Amino acid sequence: MKIDVITKEDLADLKMQLIEEIKILLQPQKNLHKQWLRSAEVRKMLNISPGTLQNLRINGMLPFTKVGSIAYYDIIDIEKMMQKGGSNVQLVRKTK
């Protein structure tokens, strides 16, 4: 019969390994982002005022979908608008 002896150091190592693996699992996925953004998120991302965002909507430069009283913007539409270069807005994507 084989007996393995586990020391306190072994348990501490196991604990640290488990903590590191849990941290990795709990981190948000960097490659994934939300598809639909609210007005406040779009304003923060583009660093624009509420009036500028409203002008983008009114002029048809940025499509949106309204659900109740909340406007939602597709991230793909925002990227398309930025690629067209039809406005002075700069897209700033923050990574964690």
Image (cartoon, rainbow, N blue to C red):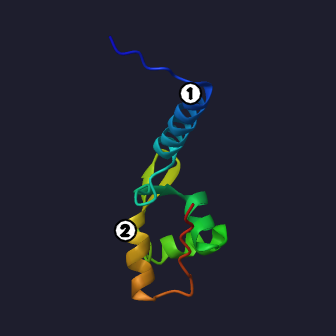
Q: Nearer the viewer, mark 1 or mark 2?
A: 1
Q: Residue, x 56% and y 82% (percent of image)?
A: 89
Q: Is residue 33 above or below residue 1?
A: below
Helix, strand or loop for disc 1? helix
Instruction: Name the residue carrying label 2.
Output: 76
Q: Position of residue 71 (x, y in %)?
A: 49, 55
Answer with left or right where residue 53 lies relative to residue 33.
right
- Residue 90 appears in which quarter of the rendering? bottom right
Identity, as a three-letter code, of the amino acid under mark 2: Ile
Q: CA distance from mark 1 to mark 2?
A: 48 Å
Q: Residue, x 51% and y 47% (percent of image)?
A: 27
Residue placed furthest toward the front: 1
Q: Residue, x 37% and y 77% (percent of image)?
A: 80
| Label 1 Cα neighbours within 10 Å, binned few <14 / some 14-19 / many ≥20 | few
Identity, as a three-letter code, of the amino acid under mark 1: Leu
Instruction: Name the residue carrying label 1.
Output: 11
Q: Position of residue 84 (x, y in %)?
A: 39, 87
Q: Is residue 56 above or below residue 32?
A: below
Q: Earlier in the sequence, mark 1 or mark 2?
A: 1
